[in-house]
Amino acid sequence: MTTFQTLAAGSHYRRVAATGVSAAFGTFGELLQGVLPGKDGDFLVTLPVAGWAVARFELHPDSEQLLVWPPRKKKALRLTSMILEEVGGPAGGVLKIDSMLPEGKGLASSSADLVATARAVANALDEPMPPRRIESHLARIEPTDGVLYPSIVAYHHRRVRLRARLGSLPSMAVVSVDEGGEVDTVAFNSIPKPFTTADKRRYARLLEHVTRAVARRDLAEVGRVATASARMNQALRHKWSLEAMTGICDSVGGLGVVVGHSGTTLGILLDTAAPDFPARLAAAAQECQELAGNVTVYRTLSFD
């Protein structure tokens, strides 16, 4: 949405007060994350969920002061400044971010903040803001999830570049627990990866498997890939509850376990179309509550 207007004065334009609003969804961790052989390197596969960050930017053309609320959203403020500098001419404004996504948990909260911000600022300026333009800015700020695209995607998060759009899946439920604490994405991505050449070849095979599984809408195979990736990630960021969560998944007939590879969350994937889904959901929630003392249920997004 935008209320941006320009007033022509010969060949010059003057900005007037305007407001832009936009949103971006988060992801529940990653279906797959690791390192590929050769120059391709670090990658992930997104799992979009129904949780959003909403950004509202009020352009104040007669001011050079930029403010953000909440004040801790400094990366979003930096992005706003970068976009305003790129389009030219001093301008100020107020950026407000309202997010459903908890921070530091592996749900792409920061990526969603930034993508929503870029779109909201662009709307206020009446500027085009396609994904590649957003990516060029985000690459200067931090590693980023592929939440720019309405699809499950394979994404080079450290290079901030799309690898491939994989497609969409039927909606699933994610019965999740949080092991506590927060993880700094930038710090996590600076850690040397302990993966061997054999590990990298296995990640390449898993990427092939999940690519075919999404194309076939094969939820069982998607779950198997997610569980395999979660286990391989234990060498990088150990999760004490992973084996217990895989046990719960097996006991309730879940599809697999998905984790925030750079976060603190784990979730059991359930097929919402299964005839006994309500019973499976209740059983999974009960066992997860007994395990970790907290449960949140998310729904994955389907883009059909």
Image: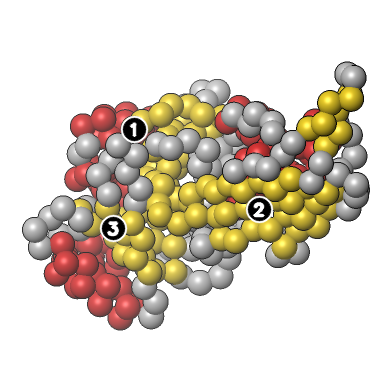
The residue located at (65%, 42%) in the rendering is: 2
Looking at the rendered image, the quarter that the C terminus falls into is top left
Amino acid on which disc 1 is placed: Gly
In this rendered view, identify the residue nearer to me: 162 or 266.
162
Q: Quadrant of residue 267?
A: bottom left
- The amino acid type found where label 2 is placed reads Arg
Marks 2 and 1 sit apart, C-alpha to C-alpha, by: 29 Å
- Residue that label 1 marks: 167
Looking at the rendering, which quadrant does residue 259 occupy? bottom left
Can residue 118 be seen? no
Q: Which residue is mark 3?
A: 173
Judging by the rendered image, the residue that carries numbered circle 2 is 56
Q: Amino acid at mark 3?
A: Ala
Residue 283 showing in the rendered view: yes
Q: What residue lies at 63% left-to-right and 31% top-to-bottom?
A: 129
The residue sitting at the left extreme is: 275
- Using the numbered discs, state the Cα–Cα distance from disc 3 to disc 2 in whole angstroms: 29 Å
Residue 295 as seen in the image, left or right of residue 262: left
Answer few, some or many: residues within 10 Å of disc 3's Cα (few below 14, many 20 plus, some between 14 and 19): many
